[in-house]
Structure formats: C-alpha cells, structure tokens
Image: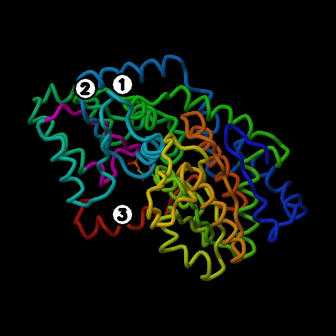
Amino acid sequence: MKAVGGIRLDVTGTENFLSAADLQAMAPAVLAAAAELEQGTCPGSEYLGWLDLPDRITEEEFQAIEASAARAREDSSLYVVIGIGGSYLGSRAILDALGGSAEGCPEILFAGTGLCSASLSRVLKKCKGRDFRICMISKSGTTLEPAVAFRTLRTMLEDQFGKEGAAERITAITDTSRGALRQLATEEGYETYIIPDNVGGRFSVLTPVGLVPLAVAGVDVRALVAGASSMRKACLAEDMSANPAHMYAAVRHGLYQQGFTTEVMSTFHSDLQTVQEWWKQLFGESEGKGGEGIFPASTVFTTDLHSLGQYVQDGKRNLQETFLCVRNAVSELTVPGDEAEGGNLDGLNYLTGRTLDDINWKAYEGTKNAHLSGGVPCTSLEIDRITPEVIGGLLFMFEKAVGVSGRLLGVNPFDQPGVETYKKEMFRLLGKPS
Ligand code: PA5
C-alpha cells in the first residue's frame, strides 16, 4: 500500500494465509461495517463522537487549551496527570513517542494508574516542596484509582499552597454534569474541561483529555489534530487498497477467522511502548466481549527477541504479528571504528560508521523474515519519522480500524461491560456503602 500520512501499511507478509481474492471477498462486509459507523446505525452509536472529532475542534478550544498550558508552564515545573485507562494512556503514549516534554516545559508525571502505594509514594516524594499542578481526568468522576490519587495529591497541594492556592493549580477534565468530580470542581472553583458525552474514554485522546496535558508538555497539538484529520479523510476511501484502517481491520479479522487469535504488536523503537499499551486498551476493551476478540499483546524488540522471541518464532501457531517500525529516529548515533593495531577484538568493524537506526532496521527486516519462515502472518506499519502529525494519524487510523473490526466480530465496540465485574467484587470486599 502507498504511504498515507507518513505511515505505510504492508500486508505482503500475510499473503500465504490471505490471498488478494480472500481480501476482495471481505470488502463488502468491511464497507458495511464502516457505513454502520458513519451512519450511526451500529450498537453503541451514542459513542461515535470520536469519528469527526479532529474536524470539530474549534479555534476557541485550541486557544483556551494553549492559554491554560502557558499558565502551567509559567508557574510549575511538574504537572501531575491523574487518570486511568483512556483517561491517561493517549497523552502518555504521544508524549513518550515524542521523547517527553519539550525544553522549558513542565515534566509530566502520571498518577492514579493503579493502586500501587510505592508508585504513588514516588510521585508524592517528587512533588513535595516543588511547584506542581494537578490535572485530574475522569469521565465518570467515580473511578477509584484516580480518585484515591487525587485526594492524596490534593491534600499535599493544599498543605503547600493553601486551599485557594491549590484550587488555582487544579484542572478537572470530566463529564458535562454528572459524577463526583464535576460536583467537586464546581464547588471548589477548579478550571474545568468537558469530555463530550458521545466520546468514550479510550477514544478521547483528541479531546481535552489528551490535548491539555500534551499542550502543557509543549507538544504541537494543532499538528497532532491535523494529522488525525488527514487520516480521517483517507479512512473514508471505499477502495480498501487506499484505506489503511479498512485494510488493517480486514487482514487481522481474516487471520482471526483462520485461528490466529492473538495479535502481537512488535516494535523496534522503545519510545513506542506506550503506544502499544494504548493500542492494547483500545482493541482489548473494544473487541474482547461475548466470547469473541483478538487478544492484543506486545513486544519490544530487540529486547524481547531474547525472551518472548523464542515463543513467537516457534511456539503455538495462533499468533499474528503487526510490526510498528520507525525508519529514522532522531539520533544520528553511529558505531565507532576500532582501527588500532590488535583492535577490533569485538569483531564489530564491519559496522563502523553505520547508524544505529540502520542496524535496527535490518534487525526488523531479519526478524520479519524469520517469523514469516516460522509460520507467523506478518503485517507492518512503517513510519519514516515520528512527528505529532504522524502520531495523530496513526492513533486515528487505529480508532477507525477497531470500530470496523469490532463490527466484523459482531460486538458493540464502544462499551466495556466486563470492566464492571472486578469493580463490584472489589467494592464488596472493601465494604463500600451502597
Ligand atoms: O475506555 C474507557 O472507557 C475506560 O478505559 C476508561 O477510560 C477508564 O475506565 C477510566 O474511566 P474514567 O475516565 O471514568 O475514570
């Protein structure tokens, strides 16, 4: 496939399992699934607001976010984002992919992503005595993990800056009117942003949920949204060979029907590890229901070639693999020569002057060849360079693909009924009053 928005989808590594004719035969079902989304006739249609989100963000919204980010940059060196699941994974994925906060911008910390006391203690220790702000994100406003972290960090902020000073340093991003966080924000006078009713958590990265923390970190959020907007247009194409979301959805579904029930996303670029985590949440929560769904897993190579690589090469043959690759990273690091007499004891002179990126790319090509020979159907998403535009396009492409793919499975991609089961059990054991 030709590159779209700086991303090239290559499905030639699946040809031994899915012929061009097989894919052609799937095209009508893929188009029907996409039409259900566009026309709002699918189950969960009340959560389709993400579909045109990149084109709905107004100049005023951008300006409000940029102004709030400028205030945070002026008085804070740390910015703590509190949220779990879709309320933090998108901003963290993009921030990690871009190598962290820009120079002169606050360091972004994440809290409330679990209940581990060691992890929250580290955040508290780092913030103590420092100029920090809190961005509390919860659509429902009732999720236990972020609520506990918020109460703890807010207490510390109030101790440091007084109640009023703390209120000026808190941003709440939540539902329009419902939930405990909305009530608290109104009563305490926090700055607030709304998560639209029709956008679910895991699809919310292009709402203030993702845009506010990213703007604070100095990310060009307009470029991010522009990338998503271009990808949205490309993903409306009827011809599957020009539509990366449709092609990706079709290939992984066709392979699933043949028993490839686990999809491993493998990257050779460790900065993309959190993008893999975001992808796992998006696909796991959207597809895994009613006894259906491709299990999303991930590996970071070459590190994991020395652990999980053995299984991928040679274990149970129910794996399909999607490579997420970057051809040119930002560093020009090369292998130094060792021309001294008696040198080259490590035998590496054949690599002298080669960039690490070039060597890493060969590792990707070699690994793909090896896994193909081991009977693993391989798809690749190849990126030249990570920029806000490209990453915005990539995330939107996955969102569109999971909508289509969920409908091909016959599930409602926009709910997560299974998540409630652990909550009920946990609250019962904790003795939560009903
Ligand atoms: O995708 C989803 O809806 C979930 O992963 C939520 O984002 C997550 O459970 C957090 O929920 P909330 O924002 O209501 O605290």
Percent across and percent down for residue 325 are: 60, 52
Residue 189's label in the rendered image is 2
Tell me if residue 101 comes above or below residue 125 in the rendering: above
- CA separation in Å, label 1 and label 3: 34 Å
Q: Between 81 and 385, which is closer to the camera in this rendering?
A: 385
As drawn, the label of residue 11 is: none
Kind of residue indicated by mark 2: Gly
Q: Is residue 80 above or below residue 59?
A: below
Residue 309 coordinates in the image, percent (x, y):
55, 73
Provide residue 391's location: percent of width, then percent of height. Answer: 57, 40
Residue denoted by label 3: 423
- For label 3, the crowd category at 10 Å Cα-Cα, with few meaning under 14, some 14 to 19 and many 20 or more, is few
Is residue 163 among the parts visible in the rendering? yes
Secondary-structure class at tag 3 = helix
* Residue drawn at 11 percent across, 29 percent down: 161
Asked if residue 259 lies left or right of residue 132, the reply is: right
Report the magenta residues as a range. Answer: 130-147
Q: In the image, which disc is placed on residue 69?
A: 1
Q: Is mark 2 on a helix, strand or loop?
A: loop
How dense is the environment of label 2, judged by Cα within 10 Å: few (below 14), some, or many (20 and up)? Answer: some
Q: How far apart are marks 1 and 2 (CA)?
A: 18 Å
Q: Earlier in the sequence, mark 3 or mark 2?
A: 2
Q: What residue type is labelled 1?
A: Ala
